[in-house]
Image (spheres, grey):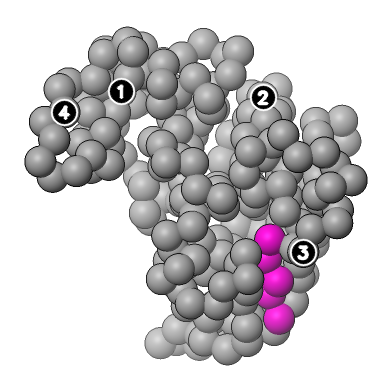
Amino acid sequence: MVEPDAEDEQPPAIVATAISVTGPWGPVYGPLSFEIPRGGLSVLLAPPGAGRTALLMTLAGRMKPSDGTLVVFGETDVRTVFGASALAGVQELDAVYESVTVADLLTEKLRWDAPWYRRVRRAGDAELARVCAPVFGALPLPQLHSYVDELDERDALLLRVALANTLAPPLLVVGGVDQVAEDASRADLVRRLVDLGQRQTVVTTSANPVPDGLGVRTQSTLAQKDGV
């Protein structure tokens, strides 16, 4: 684990300078300028909507800014950023059918990660623990036979994070923590992202500030007037 003082001496993980995205019908977000430090959990405060979603996709290399400069771990090439990041909890990208089981999702992801020549058997308890335990921590793991629609909001989002983060790249971008409506469950989610921030740089969003005492490293407000 990197000590906090050592983290502060490192260059930022992300430097955004006047980045913006413009779609067929006009501005989606921006221009926005901000920095995100290496390590820990950083929260970008912005209302839900297409602009916030597009911003998360941009930070993870899934979308290229229309204008401005985005530097992620010293890289500006969107393909390089894509390879160094995981993106989870964005409905437009990783929504799952409610009628599938945890075992179905886990098996599909492990097969996707494996080389084409390797046969991957159906996921069992060992695979569940290997993929989900680093994300769930002390929280109970979902049951293999559970359907997605049987999971509560916290566990469903943590499962999506676990599936996206199997390779644990340097950057983990997670959709808004305000997807979890209940206060205690949302606090659990934030604590788990903080723990992942000991090994990765984790970025998420929220419409409202995250309460003190949960271990968040930085919170930055992205004003609604900027189009987020």
Name the N-terminal-most of marks 1 and 3: 3
Q: Which residue is mark 4?
A: 120
Report the Cα–Cα distance between label 1 and label 3: 39 Å
Residue positioned 30% across, 23% down in the render: 102
Label 2, on which residue? 188
Q: What's the amino acid at mark 3?
A: Pro
Which of the two discs, 3 and 2, labels the residue nearer the N terminus?
A: 3
- Tell me if residue 193 comes above or below residue 41 in the rendering: above
Magenta stretch, main secondary structure class: strand
Q: Nearer the viewer, mark 3 or mark 2?
A: 3
Residue at image position (77%, 64%) is 11
Per the model, the C-alpha gap separating discs 3 and 2 is: 29 Å
The percent coordinates of residue 186 (x first, y second) are: 66, 30
Q: CA distance from mark 4 to mark 1?
A: 16 Å
Q: Which residue is mark 3?
A: 11
The residue under label 1 is which amino acid type? Val
The reply, left or right, for residue 83 in relation to residue 214 is left
The answer for how far apart the CA atoms under marks 2 and 4 are is: 32 Å
- Residue 165 vs 227, above or below: the answer is above
Q: Which mark is residue 102?
A: 1
Q: Earlier in the sequence, mark 2 or mark 4?
A: 4
Name the amino acid type tagged 2: Asp
